[in-house]
Amino acid sequence: MIEKLEQQLDSFNREERSAALKALWQMVQDHQIDLPDPSGHINLHCHTFFSFNSYGYSPSKFAWLAKKQGLAMGAIVDFDVLDGMDEFLAAARLLNLKAFSGMETRAFVPQFADKEINSPGEPGITYHMGVGFPTTTLSAENDTFLKSLKTTVGHRNIDLMNRVNDFLAPVVLDYEQDVLPLTPAGNAIERHLCLVYARKAKAMFSDNADLATYWSDKLGETIDIGDLPESATLLNLVRAKTMKRGGVGYVQPGEGSFPYMDRINEFVLAAGAIPTLAWLNGQTQGEQQIESLLDIAMATGVAAVNIIPDRNFTPGVDDDLVKNLYHFVKVAEERHLPIIVGTEMNSPGQKFSDDFDSEELSKLMPVFMKGAYIVYAHSVLKQQAGIGYIGEWADKTFDSVPAKNAFFEKIGQAIEPATEETLSQFSDRSTPEEILKSLK
């Protein structure tokens, strides 16, 4: 019964997902399912099936598994949409899981037009985020901008697919018939294309030896039968060889291919969220100039940063990756930027949450938890009282960013989903002291 309900959480039907979650929660209340106490682990960067999750997780499924595995907090970050936000926050409240929602996209940084930042092989292009969105109800202008992101991605995918089709023929895709059915709301990304190519190839070459020969010939590398039909190794190779720089379907983006970073920040701020710089690993030319990049980002509104820790260290290995990680954390701390961390789960084999008990990450946990509490508190205060980490109230209330961070960290620690509504009594006329006093 539990397994069936958990599978139903990934249905493309919202009502079915909601019913399954309520049934699972009732089983918890009836002591048929025992859930662990929250641990010190978090995942604040999980993609759902509204962009791409390699396990097909819906927002409700991620919330349930986060609770089931004892995460102290969870957050979703989908590409170019806020489609999963309302569902995720509702699920988190039901499960009494601290949570917030974000969005990721790609942006152009004109000052770094000749430098690779965090999008491999694409100078001037950066993955960029907003976190702590309080609502999906947007102004007409912001709603139009958000929809334009999704539309642009769709057009870009179709152009890419047509070029790759010519190369991978006789395995070819139809965007409407083959790709979009894998999505609940029509928001496909490159990883969807890779997955469908792998499945179409398997349908055409049922014999694994023939399938391996097909892929080896097309990709120019020997494909092991063990990687068929759709392992992470094969899917990543298809993406690298056909869709990324040097691949047959790749077209170098330039000015105009993506919105400017300051325009993305403008949208995020207007929507009540926190503009967030995404950091890769410190090895690119752009990220080696992290101070200059942060100067540019912060000047246009960036007030937090994001890290995917799991890809930035190997347990027990003191290499450049982990040194870069520590350096970036140090730089962010010096600038008083909250740090958001998590694993994406958009490629098979990725962990549900980072190994925060490892020697490399355990020493950073106080910093990571501080960032988590700050953004959670911002999200809730913005929803309940219309005040948050950014905006006029924060600007006039706090005389320094450290003072602001300390307040929001305390709020994030003190409140629980079950008590979030108690903050609705406050407004932009309230003082931090009044708010903190109410939570004691």
Image (cartoon, grey):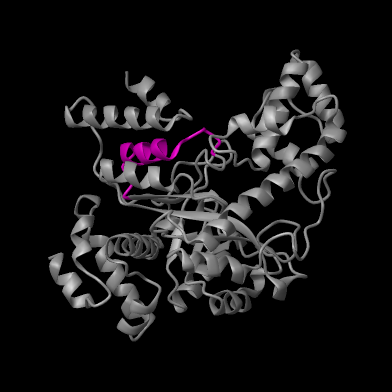
In magenta stretch: residue 190:
no
State which quadrant residue 349 falls in: top right
Residue 178 located left or right of residue 360 = right
Residue interval drawn in magenta? 53-72
The foreground one among 361 and 68 is 68
- Residue in the picture at 62% in, 68% down: 261
Q: Is residue 92 above or below residue 101?
A: above
If the image is split into quadrants, where does the C terminus sit? Answer: bottom left
Residue 6 located left or right of residue 286 = left
In magenta stretch: residue 61:
yes
Q: Looking at the picture, how far across and down is residue 89, in whole percent?
A: 35, 47
Residue 410 located left or right of residue 365 = left
Q: Is residue 151 above or below residue 31?
A: below
Residue 162 located left or right of residue 259 = right
- Residue in the picture at 37% in, 37% down: 65
Name of the residue lying farthest toward the bottom:
399
Q: Is residue 389 above or below residue 315?
A: below
Q: Looking at the picture, how far across and down is residue 356, in whole percent?
A: 41, 52
- Residue in the picture at 15% in, 64% down: 439
Q: Looking at the picture, how far across and down is residue 239, in whole percent?
A: 73, 41
The foreground one among 319 and 321 is 321
Q: Is residue 319 visible?
A: no
Name of the residue lying farthest toward the front:
140
How many numbered badges does the structure rendering display? 0
State which quadrant residue 264 falls in: bottom right
Q: Looking at the picture, how far across and down is residue 299, in whole percent?
A: 56, 80
If the image is split into quadrants, where does the N terminus sit? Answer: top left
